[in-house]
Amino acid sequence: RRRTVPRRAAKGNAVEKRDVPSQVWPVAAAAVMGISSSAALARGVAGEAAPVVIACWRVAGASALNLATRRARRGVAALDGRDATLAARSGLLLAAHFLLFFEALRRTSVLRSTILVGLCPLWVGLADRISGREVPDAFWLGCASAVAGTAVLAGDASGAAAVTGDALAAASGVLWAAYILAGRDARARVGASTWQAGVCLAATCVLAPAALLRGDALWG
C-alpha cells in the first residue's frame, strides 16, 4: 500500500503527486528513534569506554550494516576519484563530529549536548547564505524559534566542565554541518547506502588508528 505526498512543481503553483512506498514510514520512524536515543545510550557507556572508541564502533557498525548489501559494496568499489575523495573528506569530518560529541557527553548533560548539536541546520543555512545560495525566509523563522527554544531548554551551565562540554557539543554541531555540506553534491550522484558505507568506512579508518595510538582498547 502506498501513501501519496504532494510535491510542488519547479514552476508555477501546480502540485504533482509522488508515490512513497509504505515501508518507508516505519524505517523513517525507526531512524528517528535511533537518532533520538543515541545520546542517552552513548552516555550510558561513557564511563566504560573512551569517546574515540565509542565513535569508532558507531561508524564501524553503520559501515558494516550498509556494506552487508550487494548494492553498497558494488557502489563503493565503483566510486570515481572525485566522489571517493569527497567520501574520505566527509568521513574525516564525521569522525571529528562524533569524537567531539561523545566527549561532550562526558562533561555536560544529554539534554544540553543534544540541543546544541541539533543547531546543525542553522550552520548549514548560514553557510548557504554566505556562499550565495537562496535560503527561504521560513527557514530563518524556524531557526529563530529553535534557537529560542534551545535557550529555554538548555538553561544555565554550571561548572567549568559543563561549559567545556557545551563548547564541544556546539563544535560537533558545526562539524556535522560541514560534513553535510562537504558531501552534498556527491549525494546527488551516489546512492544513499553507497555513500553512507563509504563515508563511515573512511571515518572508521581514522578513528580506529587514533584509538590504538592513544592506547584505548577497542574491545574487552
Image (cartoon, helix red, strand yellow):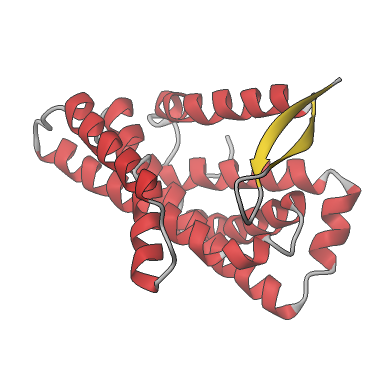
Q: Quadrant of the N terminus?
A: top right
160 displayed left or right of 95: left
Percent across and percent down for residue 191 are 76, 55
Q: Is residue 210 visible?
A: no
Specify the quadrant of the image occupied by residue 205.
bottom right
Determine whether 191 is above or below 19 in the image: below
Which residue shows up at 60% across the image and 55% down it? Answer: 204
205 displayed left or right of 117: right
Which residue shows up at 66% across the image and 66% down it? Answer: 186
Number of labels in the image equals: 0
Depth order, front residue of 89/14: 14
Which residue shows up at 57% across the image and 41% down it? Answer: 58
Percent across and percent down for residue 60 are 64, 47
Q: Quadrant of the C terminus?
A: top right
Specify the quadrant of the image occupied by residue 39.
top left
Depth order, front residue of 192/209: 192
* Residue ranking furthest to the bottom: 81
Percent across and percent down for residue 67 are 80, 49
Determine whether 115 is above or below 191 in the image: above
82 displayed left or right of 56: right
Depth order, front residue of 52/120: 120
Depth order, front residue of 49/33: 33
Which residue shows up at 69% across the image and 61% down it? Answer: 188
Percent across and percent down for residue 189 are 73, 64
Q: Is residue 202 visible?
A: yes
